[in-house]
Each structure stands twice: as structure tokens, then as C-alpha cells.
Image (cartoon, grey):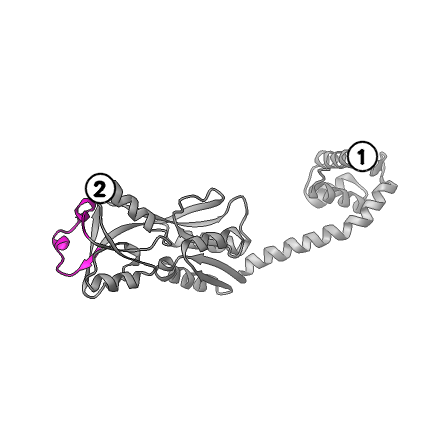
Amino acid sequence: MNVTLRQLRVFLAIARTGNFSRAGNAIGLTQPAVSRSIGELEAQLGLRLLDRTTREVVLTDAGQTLMARIGRVVEELDQALTDVTGLVQSRAGKVRVASSPTLSANLMPECIASCAQMAPGIQLILLDRIQQDVLTSVRNGEVDFGVVIEPISAQDLHGETIMLDPFVLVAPSGHALLRTKRVRWSALHGEPLVLLDHASGSRRLIDEALALHQATCPVTQELGHPTTVFRMVEAGLGVSIMPALSVPATGLPGLQVRPLTPTFKRRIMLVRRHNRALAPLGLYVWKLIQARFKP
């Protein structure tokens, strides 16, 4: 049975006004549209709901039963829709977002501050997790959406890119690779590397770029946090390849940064469950973050 809310609204309007024209005026439909909706409703139910004469419209027994049952139901539905609309307009409530550590530290503070300024009634709750756990949190509905590095396989998720972040070389001051303003990927061949571990969304992309440019390098340390990587490089355990976003704007004492060429960028994306609409407040924050990084 495929009964629509519009059909029920039309039926209630006729039952209350006793006239097709007045019902149409009450709900903003033409008389032919009202007649068509009632005909479709009666066909779906297999029952005659109205007896029509040239002067009046009278409910049948089936029509009276339906009127008694659905009047309150439709009113409650209208109130629920009004409440939801009011929630969006008032912009009050909680939105949960998960992101990986690098993004949590270097991207999300601006987003949270922007949300607090533009919609102070929204509490943006951040879950700081490794990328795989971020994706899991999105899939199981624990969070409204996630902020991740382009996932290798996530056909069950809908993603939209918000920015591109290039990879850079981080090396101790005075290192031979720092003699040029830009460093070729191939020049890294044989260099000991300190890298983020495979829990990071960036590691797969770094490995792909090294392989593409035939740079075979021993990995001396694999670590979970950028700050630890930088300390290891400062201690002389190797150089590192890091996303530019992970480098503090104030610089790194004892270390220097160089762009890598050809430029290789990671995509930073917002992800949510595929074919599942975001709640109104979640959609508002999603669009807010998109706008924050729109070029």
C-alpha cells in the first residue's frame, strides 16, 4: 500500500470543509489536484471514503473511521516536523565528528572555533582517533561524520574533498638534501627515514610516492604522532616525509622543511555513511567546514 502524506492531508481537508474547492484553498491545491489525490487514496485503500453529490461531500462509514484515526496522527507528525525545523533554525544541539590525530591538531581547532562563533548553540564534540577507527565510528553511527585522509577503500561511505595537502621533506639543519629549495623524490633514495606508521592515512600515500619515484629507503622508526617523528629527526635518526599540515606554522627548532617535487598531495575529506542523510545539525556543520576551506 502506497498511501502518501499528501493524500491524507487532502482527505482531512475535505472532511473538515465538506467541499473540494474549499479544501483546495485551505491546502494550496487546485480542485482537479484535490480530486486526483482522493481518487488515488481510495484506489490504494480499495474503499470509497466520500459520497459526492452536486451540493455536498459526505464521509462514508470507512471515511468516518479513517478521519477518527488519522486526524491526531497527522497533527503529531506536523508537530514533529515543526520541532525538527525549529531545531535547525535555533542551531542548538550536539554534533559528533571524528578525525585522525594530525587533522585533529592542525585542522579541527579552526573548525571548532568557527562553529562556536557562527552557531554558539551547537556543541561540536571531537573524537581524536587513528584513521581506521575514524572510519569505523562513521560506519557504526557513533559520529555524524569524519574527517580523514582519502581512504583506500570505502565504497560504503560518501566523501567530499575539502583541501589538498602536499608532502614535504623534514630534515636536520645542515643536511645535504637542504642545499636546494626543492627536493626531488628520487634524491631520497638510500636515505634513512623516520615515518608515520601504517595506522596513519598518510603512510600508504608516502609509500606509493617513494615506489613511483624508485626511491628505496630504510625506515629506522615508524611512529604514531608527528611530534615524535620530529624529535627523532632532530636526534639524527633520519629524515622524514610529512604532510605540510603537520608542520607547525612557527617552524621546527633545529629542523628545516623543503617542498618535494614532483608535488604529491593527499586529499583531506569529509566522510559520512553512503545513502544516509545527515541530521540537520550535522549537515549544517558539514557545510560550515566545507565553506571554511573553500578556495
Q: Is residue 130 left or right of residue 141?
A: left
Q: Secondary structure at mark 1?
A: loop
Q: Which residue is mark 2?
A: 214
Front position in the image: 198 or 62? 198
First in sequence: mark 2 vs mark 1: 1
Q: Is residue 5 left or right of residue 110?
A: right
Q: Amino acid at mark 1?
A: Gly
Instruction: Where is residue 205? Give x, y as percent.
Output: 32, 47
Instruction: Where is residue 114? Give x, y as percent.
Output: 41, 61
Residue neighbourhood size for the residue with mark 2, other residues' Cα within 10 Å, grouped as few (<14), some (14–19), many (≥20): some
Measuring 71% from the left and 43% from the top, which residue is drawn there? 25
- Over which residues does the magenta segment extend? 170-191
Q: Is residue 22 left or right of residue 119?
A: right
Q: Which residue is mark 1?
A: 46
Query: In the picture, residue 46 is in which quadrant?
Result: top right
Q: CA distance from mark 2 to mark 1?
A: 72 Å
Q: Amino acid at mark 2?
A: Gln
Measuring 29% from the left and 63% from the top, which residue is drawn there? 228
Taking the magenta stretch, the answer to whether it contains residue 64 is no
Front position in the image: 102 or 73? 102
Taking the magenta stretch, the answer to whether it contains residue 179 is yes
